[in-house]
Image (spheres, grey):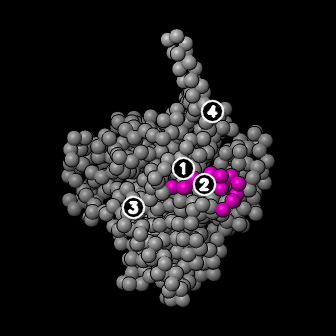
């Protein structure tokens, strides 16, 4: 009797494991500080991204995808399914000298997938806590992490420099799990690309794979040498008028090459046809100001760090073999917090409850209306808040004018005719992969490019542009005016009152940020072999 019972348990366990093995793999690729205008499927002929574009043309491009306006809150929302202000991760991003992290009481994405048999790996950026071991990726559901723990690194030397009140502080920030990765050489986008390919190649296919590739690119490096790319790739960008934009374009080119290589690696492993691929930017680009990478959000208004569309409406797509036959443009609202429940549903896992994220999988697959009609961006550190509900968006508090105007249009110049988009598509890695799978597609989906392209009749020098602050509130109809050029608050006082009241409900959920952010001397790299390493013990309160 006992042996029969044990046999039954064994059969149930085997059946469960087989069920997990059949779940789709997930590869989630994140670009860092990439502008709306910096993918060619949005209509740009200056920077060509054929591999990314083909995933959009044969998958689903997400037209109204929103994130938080800076990296730490956007990654926190991605991992938890909760708005950044709900976990206290809103506002100015984490610095390497802070003893602060995404609360360890929060269950995060790799932990959910790991419970269902997934092998979980992170390549690249973490940026949600690094001062203690329990804050690190391998303590929070990832089987492995190779990458940087802070906000960015030099593309060749892998160090990060911060300016403290004692002066400039610099340290090495590249790790393999808990160990410093001293033995690495090469351009960091290539290094991360090779690591992602190696993980795919060595993956045990009896388990489903969850691989997050969080690139450093195209974030700027340290302020002293912000734009870095291989010289031959930069020279290939001579059609671009401004030299700083050429460097940025080369950084994006290497990122696009990586996307192609990852797709090919999945094909060669034999798992591409059972894999969901997501590509997103964590927030808008930074055309100017400190840490500028010369990205362009044009024609959207505002930069990274602002609640305007240029800061929070970003590039996104989702691809799987099952999506290649349907509509390739989804116009519904989606927020970065929605990925956790949406991907859970896509791989037949019951989505978690008591989160802000909404399961949008069926809406995307069926090209039906989004269940989301509310998006909020709250930054009590800087002092602004915004709410989107339906077609309308209200912004209140103090925005920074130099970050909140129209930029990017001066970066778009092309010298001569520029490269052939058709040639770039046909010579791309993803083109050859799709051809081998006999997936039908129009190699230039002009229809999708035209539909998703945003056009606004803008006067960038107008003095009538609304900036919230000092009691001024700005209201926009972002469906009719996606570039936020016409403030309609004066003619819609009832709508202003209604949206403001709803925003106040949301602000009650905020876990307040402490200002200024910490620069703890115990974190000094000089105390840790010149490395931004763990510096506080787990038993320290």
Separation of disc 1 and disc 2 at Cα? 8 Å
Task: Please give the label number shown on residue 85.
Answer: 3
Front residue (pair 126, 361): 361
Answer with left or right where residue 286 lies relative to residue 233: left
Query: Does the magenta segment cover residue 362?
Result: yes
The residue beneath circle 4 is 22
Mark 1 or mark 3: name the one nearer the start of the chain. Answer: 3
Secondary structure at numbered mark 3: helix
Image point 48% across, 35% down: which residue?
115
Task: Please give the label number shown on residue 380.
Answer: none
Task: Classify 10 Å Cα crowding around label 2: few (below 14), some (14-19), many (20 and above).
Answer: many
Q: Give the extent of the magenta segment.
A: 357-369
Task: Classify 10 Å Cα crowding around label 4: few (below 14), some (14-19), many (20 and above).
Answer: some
Q: Is residue 254 visible?
A: no
Q: Is residue 138 above or below residue 62?
A: above
The residue beneath circle 2 is 360
Image point 49% across, 78% down: which residue?
498
Q: Are marks 1 and 4 in contact (CB under 8 Å)?
A: no
Separation of disc 1 and disc 4 at Cα? 19 Å
Name the front one of labels 1 and 3.
Answer: 1
Separation of disc 3 and disc 4 at Cα? 36 Å
Image point 47% across, 45% down: which residue?
109
Task: Please give the label number shown on residue 341.
Answer: 1
Prevalent SS, magenta region: loop
Q: Position of residue 6 (x, y in %)?
A: 51, 15
Q: Position of residue 519 (x, y in %)?
A: 24, 56
Mark 1 or mark 4: name the one nearer the start of the chain. Answer: 4
Q: Are marks 1 and 3 in contact (CB under 8 Å)?
A: no
Q: Is residue 76 above or below residue 409?
A: above
Q: Is residue 529 visible?
A: yes
């Amino acid at each position: 009797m006992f042996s029969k019972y044990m046999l039954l348990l064994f059969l149930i366990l085997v059946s469960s494991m087989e069920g997990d093995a059949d779940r789709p793999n997930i590869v989630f690729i994140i670009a860092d500080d990439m502008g709306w205008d910096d993918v060619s499927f949005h209509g740009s002929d200056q920077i060509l991204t054929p591999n990314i574009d083909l995933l959009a043309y044969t998958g689903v491009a997400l037209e109204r995808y929103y994130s938080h306006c800076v990296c730490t809150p956007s990654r926190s929302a991605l991992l938890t399914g909760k708005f950044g202000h709900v976990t206290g991760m809103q506002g100015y991003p984490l610095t390497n000298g802070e003893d602060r992290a995404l609360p360890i009481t929060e269950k995060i994405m790799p932990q959910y997938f790991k419970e269902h048999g997934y092998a979980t790996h992170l390549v690249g950026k973490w940026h949600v806590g690094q001062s203690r071991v329990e804050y690190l990726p391998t303590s929070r559901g990832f089987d492995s992490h190779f990458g940087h723990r802070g906000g960015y690194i030099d593309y060749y030397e892998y160090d990060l420099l911060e300016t403290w009140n004692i002066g400039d502080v610099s340290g090495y920030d590249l790790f393999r799990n808990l160990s410093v990765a001293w033995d690495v050489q090469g351009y960091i986008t290539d290094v991360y690309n090779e690591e992602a390919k190696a993980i795919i190649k060595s993956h045990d296919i009896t388990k489903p794979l969850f691989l997050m590739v969080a690139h450093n690119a195209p974030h700027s490096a340290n302020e002293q040498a912000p734009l870095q790319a291989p010289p031959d790739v930069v020279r290939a960008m001579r059609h671009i008028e401004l030299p700083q934009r050429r460097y940025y374009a080369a950084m994006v080119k290497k990122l696009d090459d990586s996307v192609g290589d990852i797709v090919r690696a999945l094909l060669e492993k034999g798992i591409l046809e059972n894999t969901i691929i997501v590509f997103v930017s964590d927030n808008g680009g930074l055309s100017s100001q400190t840490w500028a990478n010369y990205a362009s959000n044009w024609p959207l208004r505002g930069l990274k760090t602002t609640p305007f569309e240029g800061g929070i409406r970003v590039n996104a797509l989702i691809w799987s073999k099952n999506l290649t036959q349907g509509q390739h443009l989804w116009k519904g609202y989606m927020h970065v917090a929605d990925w956790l429940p949406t991907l859970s549903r896509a791989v037949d896992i019951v989505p978690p409850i008591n989160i802000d994220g909404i399961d949008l999988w069926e809406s995307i697959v069926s090209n039906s209306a989004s269940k989301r009609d509310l998006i909020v961006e709250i930054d009590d550190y800087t002092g602004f808040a915004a709410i989107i509900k339906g077609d309308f968006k209200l912004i209140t508090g103090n925005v920074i004018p130099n970050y909140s105007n129209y930029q990017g249009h001066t970066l778009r110049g092309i010298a001569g005719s520029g490269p052939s988009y058709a040639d770039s598509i046909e010579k791309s890695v993803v083109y050859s992969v799709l051809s081998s799978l006999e997936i039908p597609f129009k190699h230039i989906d002009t229809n999708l490019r035209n539909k998703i392209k945003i056009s606004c009749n803008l006067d960038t020098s107008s003095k009538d542009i609304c900036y919230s602050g000092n009691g001024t509130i700005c209201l926009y109809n972002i469906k009719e005016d996606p570039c936020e050029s016409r403030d309609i608050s004066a003619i819609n006082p009832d709508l202003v009152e209604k949206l403001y009241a709803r925003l106040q409900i949301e602000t009650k959920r905020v876990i307040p940020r402490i200002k200024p952010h910490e620069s703890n001397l115990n974190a000094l790299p000089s105390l840790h072999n010149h490395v931004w390493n763990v510096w506080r013990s787990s038993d320290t309160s």
